Image (spheres, helix red, strand yellow):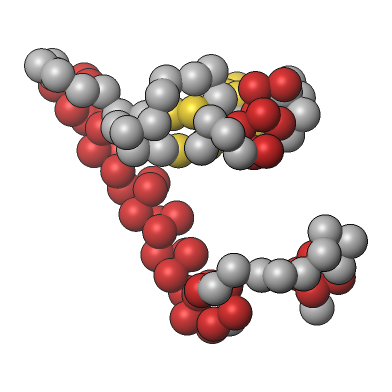
Amino acid sequence: FRNSGLFRWLQEGILFPDQKITVGDVEMPIVILGDAAYPLMPWLMKPYTGALDSDKELFNYRLSKCRMVLECAFGRLKGRWRSLLTRSDLSETNIPIVIAA
């Protein structure tokens, strides 16, 4: 992950430059959800590890529910478009056209 273009773009602030969303009356930054294996970054939300109090356990539970929704969505996408299961050998210029189609 650290060697990917995605990581570099996130580190440089290219993907979500100071964008925020409002949920209820709380303004929040846009972040990527990860599991405990990922490094903690300002743009990556991951669960707490180690000895947890009830607030941290609740946070981990809610984060897990969010990640499950995403995993199910990706599962549905891969079920519907089987081509997502394999590597795409398209050129970078053609990828947006294929996605739009």
For residue 24, side relative to residue 39 (left or right): right
- The reply to whether residue 24 is in sight is no
Q: Which residue is found at the position 77% from the left and 29% from the top?
A: 14
Q: Is residue 82 above or below residue 49?
A: below
Residue 70, image x, y percentages: 45, 55
Q: Residue 51 lies in what quarter of the image?
A: top left
Q: Nearer the viewer, residue 49 or 86?
A: 86
Q: Position of residue 79 (x, y in %)?
A: 47, 81
Q: Splitting the image into 4 quarters, where does residue 38 fall?
A: top left
Q: Position of residue 93 (x, y in %)?
A: 89, 61
Return the residue nearer the eye: 84 or 60: 84
> Which quadrant is home to the C terminus?
bottom right
Residue 88 place in picture, x, y as percent: 66, 70
Left or right of residue 46, residue 84 in this image: right
100 relative to 16 in the view: left or right: right
**Residue 69, visible in the rendered structure:** yes
Q: Report whether 99 appears left or right of 32.
A: right
The residue located at (38%, 48%) in the rendering is 67
